[in-house]
Image (cartoon, rainbow, N blue to C red):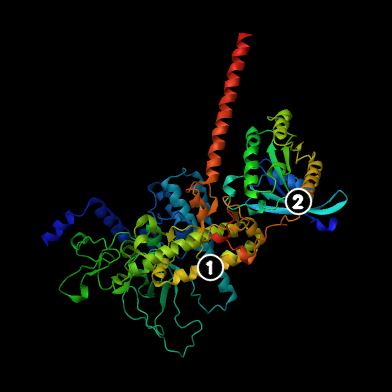
Amino acid sequence: MSSWRESLTSIPGSVAQFINESASSYLHQQPSTVGRADSDGGGSEESGPQGEYRALPIPASLVREQWRLIFTSDANIQDLQEAIAHCKDLVLLSEELSEERRWLVRHLVDLRYSLQQLEEAQEAHQSLPSDIVVMDAIRAVVGHHFVPHHPHHGKRSRLQVATKRNYCDHCTAIIWSVVQASYVCSDCGYLVHQKCIDSVKRVCAHVLVSERQHPVSEICPEIGLASQGYKCSECGTPLNLKSSWIEPRLCDYSGLYFCPRCHWGDTTFIPARVIHNWDFSPRRVSRTALQEIRLFLNKPLIRLEEDNPKLFVFVEKLCTVKKLRQNLVHMRHYLAACRMATEQKLVDQQLGGRRHLAQSNEFYSLSDLSQVETGALAEFLQAVFKAFDEHIRSCPMCLAQAYICEICSNNEVIFPFDDGCIKCDQCNSIFHRVCLTRKNMICPKCTRIQERRLQLDRMRSAEEDEDATDDEGTKAE
Amino acid sequence: MASRKKSLLKVIILGDSSVGKTSLMNQYVNKRFSNQYKATIGADFCTKEVVVNDRVVTMQIWDTAGQERFQSLGVAFYRGADCCVLVYDVTAPNSFKNLDSWRDEFLIQASPRDPEHFPFVVLGNKVDLDNRQVSTRRAQQWCQSKNDIPYYETSAKEGINVELAFQTIAKNALEQEAEADVVNDFPDQIILNSQNNRPGNPDNCQC
């Protein structure tokens, strides 16, 4: 036991700090959101300032006004409208960039969201017979937006047997969907019994993702059980090595220990291991980590070349993908300037939601990386390249903006994405690789630009001299 | 004889950013002017039918991006040009100084048959403004030093001299064309999408 504590002190300062930060973001609670379940973030995690989604406690200076601002679920439309008006006044009175204004603006969003929901509910109520209870209200708890979960709705017929059992993320028991109502978080997919909904402790993974902004970049930053106080880092259950019911389970993503209720032994690849080791082997992670990694999956956030430049030397597949993406970036310049391609929506049509692949060649999403490994990404990019290439070589406008190698001055047109061509990094001119090699890799255009600059400088100094002599002349007179 | 001549004249407008290239073209083709500045991205062209020496010809006027950051693409369309219009702003001396480099770049990229006698036309635009900085004499001197390039002072806003300038442009372009016709093997335009012209093939290199 004591040796564990000693090993803790040997952790480098920065790592320990990072761990403490990440641990606290897991543990932080949102007291006021729990307090007023009727108002919730209303999508403010996405549109609002990222990374600071935190339901702040009401500022001390506003406590006096509290009764006019905060409402419970029994508030009616009129109450809310009054509160909104009052809140708006207070926003205007508050100081710019102050805590108060921040709180008030966020609260105003919450209030308006609640009002809209209430109005929609009422409208629906009016159009329906009065004995049907409206069940679609969103319930917000610790950042989750719970909507009623109907596993048998949709296309599947009622007679078909559910292929997958659903478990409650809170109590881990099966959700018997025929007899038990359940909710699912529309942001992170957290599934929960109706009866468990008010005791949910795990902060919504979507909130964590927007706060953290990047996946954990250290490989399993473990801090040890001692510094967790032998408690589950999520629900605070005391952990014990003797009983398998409360055994500590390590999450390979966050490096924290969890109880079996919060860590179901799910396996997934770990972003940090991919970035540093190109290791896609599945590891055991906690539920919250799994939900978080899933949310990170399609976000192009990883600057792979910056984080691990040597990877491109060792992994040949990455090189191929990098080259293809570079070519697509060149092609995108043509397509963005071409009226016909814009009309056809060629870029959207080919890339869909993966526009980042042709935007620049630095950002990768986690799913991009796993597709690099399987080879699917290279295939996908090849297909896009082919479609773009077909357009550019048949479009008169794109062809008009091709390049001509000025060294050989041959009439054939060349493009930056052609194989035998090379680009001057300084002036962006394109030459045949063989031609530029013959010129000892000295770009003729850059030479001209330099000469011209010198000439202009000389002219300018000559003019100044003239002015100076003129001045002297006038003085002498 | 006339049937042998092509009836498409390709004219390229070059010059620094915001000297009024797009405005000149718009004034000539559409008789419109807007005070709002909108940078041209890449290149684009307009066509207009004109009568020169009793012949109807189509003028294809290429408007280009003056701003360096919008010149991210190539200029293969310089090839096969019949006339090049160099535009500067009479209130901006730097745009005048840069005419030299625009001319040189054009000659290198377009590589016309006879660079010395290729028809250029210089336009000093924005003469309607009060704060003139480049004198007529200075501009005329430069034009004379470059093989007597025709020089006009225009205003795209007021429509001053625009029609006259483009008439000269069309006439000179057609003359250049006629000279080329005498040689008779001048390619009409580069055939950009022909299969055997695939780029990147070093065997095609003529040097």
Kind of element beneath mark 2? helix
Q: Residues within 10 Å of mark 2 (few under 14, many from 20)?
A: some
Amino acid type of the residue that numbered disc 1 sits on in the rendered structure: Val
The one of B115 and B65 positioned closer to us in this rendering: B115
Real-space Cα distance between discs 1 and 2? Answer: 43 Å
- Residue drawn at 51 percent across, 51 percent down: A436
Q: State which quarter of the image contains the N terminus of chain A.
A: bottom left
Residue B191 drawn above or below residue A61: below
Query: Is residue A262 among the parts visible in the rendering?
Result: no
Q: Nearer the viewer, mark 1 or mark 2?
A: 2
> How many discs mark residues in the rendered view?
2
Choose between A477 and B147: the one closer to the eye: B147
Q: Of all residues shown, which one is farthest toward the right?
A: B54
What chain is tagged by disc 2?
B
Please report the residue visible at 22 percent of the width from the left and 61 percent of the height from the top.
A228
Badge 1, how many Cα within 10 Å: few under 14, some, many 20+? many
Q: Can you identify the residue that label 1 sits on?
A: A384
User: Callout 1: helix, strand or loop?
Assistant: helix
Residue holding disc 2: B180
Picture layout, residue B89 above or below residue B170: above
Q: Position of residue A240 (x, y in %)?
A: 17, 70
Residue at the image position 29 percent from the left and 57 percent from the top: A24
Residue A416 picture location, percent across and down: 54, 57
Is disc 1 in the same subunit as disc 2?
A: no
Q: The C terminus of chain A appears in which quarter of the rendering? A: top right
Horizontal side of residue A131 vs A273, given as left or right:
right
What's under tag 2, amino acid-wise? Ala
Q: Which chain's residue wears label 1?
A: A
Pinpoint residue A92: horizontal percent, then vertical percent: 51, 46
Of residue B4 and residue A297, the one placed in the foreground of this image is B4
